Amino acid sequence: MPEKKIETSQATQATAPAELGVAAEMPAGRPSAFQALKAPNYRAFWVGSFLSNIGTWMQSVAQGWLVLQLTNSPLWLGLVGFASSLPSLVFSLMGGVWADRFNRRKLLFFTQSMMMVSALAIGLLTAGHRIVVAEIMLFGFLSGLANSVNGPAYQATLPDLVNEKDLLNAVALDSAQFNLSRVVGPTLGGLALAAFGVAACFFLNAASFLALLAALTLIRLPGNVTVSKNTIWRDLIEGVQYVRRTPILLVVLLIVAVMASFGMPYVTMLPVFARDILKSGASGLGYLYGAAGIGAVIGTLTLAALRDLKHKGITILTCSSLFGLSIVLFGLSRNYLMSLFFLSLVGMMMIGALTLAKTLLQATASVEMRGRVMSMYFFCGVGFFPLGNLVAGTVAGWRGATFALEFGGSVVLLFSVTMLIFVPRIRRWVRQGSRSPNP
């Protein structure tokens, strides 16, 4: 993709809120929990992302079920998840450099198109009864490659769509749409899987990308790209050095990495729990995904209503502790309704920690470094996920899915509690929120 060298003039910056659809100043009074949606750019982006994510979650349900049918192995579930997420571990940091150097809207349009083509291809192979696990891994890898660039660009775009004071509200509402899609998408995916078969879920996901592509043609963004005399590799090194000099960024990214490595792979093991442990079938699998989504929506709407929050760092650690504990309790449960309840807690605590982490990072990072900082968030949150899937799949193949979840949840819980109790210096760092104290 050719590099676009655009410099935003002072006049453009001065008129940006009016011209770019940023929400106008609120009159005195109680702020709205949906304030960010008053910005036309953000509203179009939100709706397009929501519809697209519904399709993605439908495919997630179908793909896990398909892999289990083809292999009858929880190890292969972990391996497929590893292949899909591996590119984020390798390429997401470079994706952040591109998000700072290229036009973000065009970059998002390209990556979303690539993921749409991947979903369509795997749907056609499945419909033709020619699909094998190797092809699922291949297209998962290609889709993950596009997502490794898409993720940092997406996160770096959010602050350009709203006023700075509405950033937490915007991030929370964005998390809300993602997690509302976790309720709607898996539920629809389970129903479509039972009624129309696996291939239909892949086709519906391919069609859902059209919603965000349409939104990207409608919104206007400021020219985020500036002339850089550095090589891409040098820009990447500068981003890493910037984070290393800012303790609050380091601490938050470490928390996200531990959650992604040991906690989030619970998602990959859900098909095993639905089929073999809870005996709930394909439709029950959709409800398990949906329960975590409901909890996440409740958490994000609570954060959106608060609009701002002091002591974000301590709240992040508290949420991550409860996230690990909830995973352990879900792994121990053999009652379907109790499992749904524990999964709702998992979703609520996970999204509380991640939403506040994203807000803290976006508010702390300078504009010229935002893409690279958010790529490191993506690297820790999504890039470490394949390693977690690999570990979870291996442990599940050795000792079973229950032990794998209990192990991962316990690591997250112990790490978070240790950070809260035994490292007071880090507690001072994270308590200071967006400030960056000297070490």
Image (cartoon, helix red, strand yellow):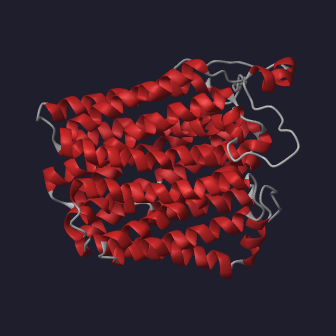
Residue farthest toward the front in the current orientation of the protein: 29
Residue 346 shown left or right of residue 20 in the figure: left
Foreground pick, 1 / 411: 411
Residue 275 placed where, x, y %? 21, 62
Residue 340: quadrant of the picture: bottom left
Q: Compared with residue 90, is residue 11 higher up or lower down, i.e. above or below?
A: above
Foreground pick, 26 / 117: 26
Quadrant the C terminus occupies: bottom right
Q: Compared with residue 253, is residue 379 higher up or lower down, i.e. above or below?
A: above
Residue farthest toward the left in the current orientation of the protein: 129
Residue shown at the point (28%, 48%) measured from the top left = 190
Q: Compared with residue 345, is residue 420 higher up or lower down, i.e. above or below?
A: below
Foreground pick, 438 / 99: 99
Q: Is residue 280 in sight in this rendering?
A: yes
Residue 10 placed where, x, y %? 86, 21
Residue 224: quadrant of the picture: top right
Residue shown at the point (72%, 25%) measured from the top left = 21
Q: Is residue 232 in sight in this rendering?
A: no
Q: Compared with residue 336, is residue 418 higher up or lower down, i.e. above or below?
A: below
Residue 161 placed where, x, y %? 69, 32
Residue 387: quadrant of the picture: bottom left
Residue shown at the point (57%, 48%) measured from the top left = 175
Residue 435 placed where, x, y %? 82, 57
